[in-house]
Amino acid sequence: MKFGNEMSLFKIIIDKDYKDLLLTNLAEFKLTHIREKGEYQSKIKNEEEDIFKDKLKNLRLNLEMLLKKLDITELDFQELNIKKGIKKGEKINFVAKDSHDLINNFLEEINFYTNRFNELERYTSTTRIELEKINNIEKTYQFLENYGISRENLSNLAYFDFKIYTTYSKNLSILNNIFEFSEFPSVIQTQTISNDRTAFFIIYPKEKENQLKEKISMIHGEAVPILKKFLTTSGINFKRIYNELELIENYLKKYENELRRIRDNNLLKFAAIEEGISNLEEYSWVSNQFEELSLNRLSYKFFVLKAKKEELKEKLINIFHDKITFEVLNIGKGGKITRDQDNIEKVLKKQTKKSGSKSKERPKDEGESTEKWDDLKGETPTLMLHNRLIRPFETLTKMYGTPSYSEVDPTPFLFITFPLIFGIMFGDIGHGLVLIISGIVGAILFRKRERDLRNFCWIIFWCGCWSILGGFLYGEFFGYEEILGYHLQPIPIPIPFIGFINLFDPLNNVFVIFILTIFIGVIHINLGWLIQFVNFWKMSKKYKAFTETLMKILFLDGGILLIFVWGIDFEAWLASPFPPILLPLIPAIMLFLFKPVGKVLGISYLKKESFMGLIGKGSMDTFETVLSVLSNVLSYIRLLALALAHISLLLAIKAMVSIIPGEGIFIQIVIVIVLILGNTIVILLEGVLVFINAIRLHFYEFFFKFYEGRGKAFIPFILEKKYSIISFKRDTEKDLISSAIEREIETEKTRESIKDARNYISTNYF
């Protein structure tokens, strides 16, 4: 659907109880830009807002901790959306009375899964410890089996004790030293049971128990229990060990599977909660833009496309009926503000006719709006609306800045001038084809990535198209003058006051290309000033448009015409009866004089200035224009320099190929490889350099003439719904009688407070 980008400002007043319902409906509309409340209102401390922010911050931290524990990242959510393509019926639905209730719902969900995870993690940790113990027992008992250990053998040790330990293998040398028989009579045997662990058993006198403990602590030995349940009278009961090992492993798998199940089966729910919290964070900022009024009422302001305002009006009244009032201001691009009248009444009458009931008369809201253009022009957002061909160049415009609401958007002009200037500097049919293919492939590959990245791919595509045109003008196809046997022919280009020129053989045709670049620069600068003329006209500054912008255009064009027609011949410039020198001189003088003349004529923006101040400004403006015009025009000589550099690099590649000696298929393959590598380097290196210079010419020579780029981008208030649906539903809606009673009670309380204050002042001060 296509519609204009003029804005309307809605000023809504609504009961505080319906705030959440209003915001969710505005988010669904997706075409409202929230206006920030005034600086004074922003400074007012609101305890409720602070509590909400703290709860929201705590909720975000709890979710991040849970996602970290479950090893869930944003990439998992993106893959979930790409692979499954979440349908409407699959989305998680959250229903709450208000935003605080929604936070509590989220917190309950997060706490439930956090507690479940912590419980399972505790079980898993305990089970892993038990599994490690039983593994150590199994390995050490395998070691003991070599020595015929049994329950009966151990019972025969009357004066000796038998123990088994594990330690790090690096402690073996210490182990042998501290258990030398002369110092500690014992029998000791060791065996490696893993890469870094060694098991050993020791038989020692029972009275040496304390000495044994000291020596074991020196090597950090860990005791392995000799459990009777794993021993029989004849040996070791490995079957029971393996059964217990299997049982513990099964428990561990069960816990790990449950953790994976929590992660995988609830991934959509976690994505929905994360999205819901992000929406609440956005919602929190938007909610804070309400301004508190008396009687439990709130004021709210937002911008919407003028073409969509009637649809929004009807939507709001269908939902809230007479519980909402609003004023609509239509903001013209040129500074005119108009106000809609009696919109609510018209829709209510239409509804009552359908239902057959009687409509309730509402007082008409007459009177003019207090909003002024000077206040709104800096706050009204700009929505850049262009068709698919032009849209990619919005990225270049936004690099400089978003156009203000009253400015002319330069994006459509960039669509023509940017690739044209690029093509003049990068003129080659073959290289243009490479850019076209690269742009299309990039746009396909990055179609699901950031919009700016896709836009750059399409900009490259259009630059490639104009490079092909430049290639036909220069007669260049990968540095050659023919395409598959077809010899390229010169294409004549008409230049005013000069005639037809052709650009073939650029290195021997430098002056002709120089004239073309100057001509392009003059047209480009003129275009910038013409747009400035339109900007002044739209802002009702017609005097400024004629006396400044038009004079600068006439000065530039007169100077160029003087040089191209009469050359650098001072006698010809001063020839009578009409000296050609007057072509640039008269506009320069007018540029100087029109400022003080404007004060005499009573031009509004010049009234407060003094005559001397205006003469000083006029002289400075004239002097600056003369210098800037000269430097601006000369800047376009870079078109010539980079075009010649591009062609020279291609000639260098051709020269390299020509000196490769020999014949045969191998030499031909080498030549093809050299040509491919050489052209690739030229495309990458020269392409980047040309692209940067094309940006520079537009930002500094073109935009500087008319474009400030200090506007606010239109950012629609949207609550994401990829994974979740949030519904705010009040338990009971107050009827008109209840609302009226509440207002009456509040009014009575106010009266009593005033009466008490009056009595207090009378008693104490009079």
Image (spheres, rainbow, N blue to C red):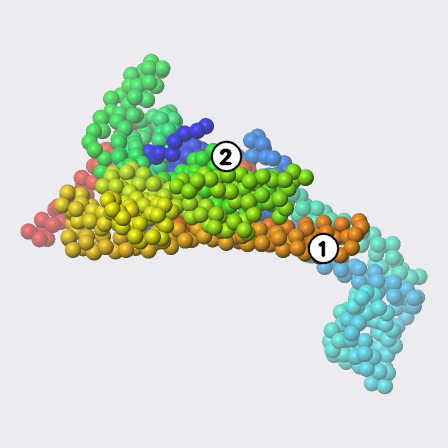
Q: Tell how many labels.
A: 2
Whether residue 450 is visible to the viewer of this picture, yes or no, is no
Q: Residue at x 48, y 48 (%)?
A: 513
Q: Amino acid at mark 1?
A: Thr
476 or 267, nearer to the observer = 476
Helix, strand or loop at disc 2?
loop
Helix, strand or loop at disc 1?
helix
Q: Quadrant of the N terminus?
A: top left
Furthest toward the top, the residue is: 356
Q: Residues within 10 Å of mark 2 (few under 14, many from 20)?
A: few
Q: Quadrant of residue 631?
A: bottom left
Q: Residue at x 28, y 23 (%)?
A: 345
Q: Give the residue number, with chain letter if any, for mark 1.
A: 127
Task: Find residue 334 and report its horizontal and vertical position in percent.
Answer: 29, 36
Whether residue 238 is visible to the viewer of this picture, yes or no, is yes
Q: Earlier in the sequence, mark 2 or mark 1?
A: 1
500 lies above or below 681: above
Q: Residue at x 86, y 75 (%)?
A: 188
Give the CA separation, mark 2 to mark 1: 60 Å
Task: Find residue 266 and report its horizontal and vertical position in percent.
Answer: 61, 41
Q: Which mark is residue 388?
A: 2
Task: Find residue 223 and report its horizontal and vertical position in percent.
Answer: 77, 69
346 on left or right of 60: left
706 on left or right of 491: left
Q: Nearer the viewer, mark 2 or mark 1?
A: 2
**Are circles 2 and 1 on residues that touch, CB within 8 Å?**
no
193 on left or right of 704: right
Q: Quadrant of residue 212?
A: bottom right
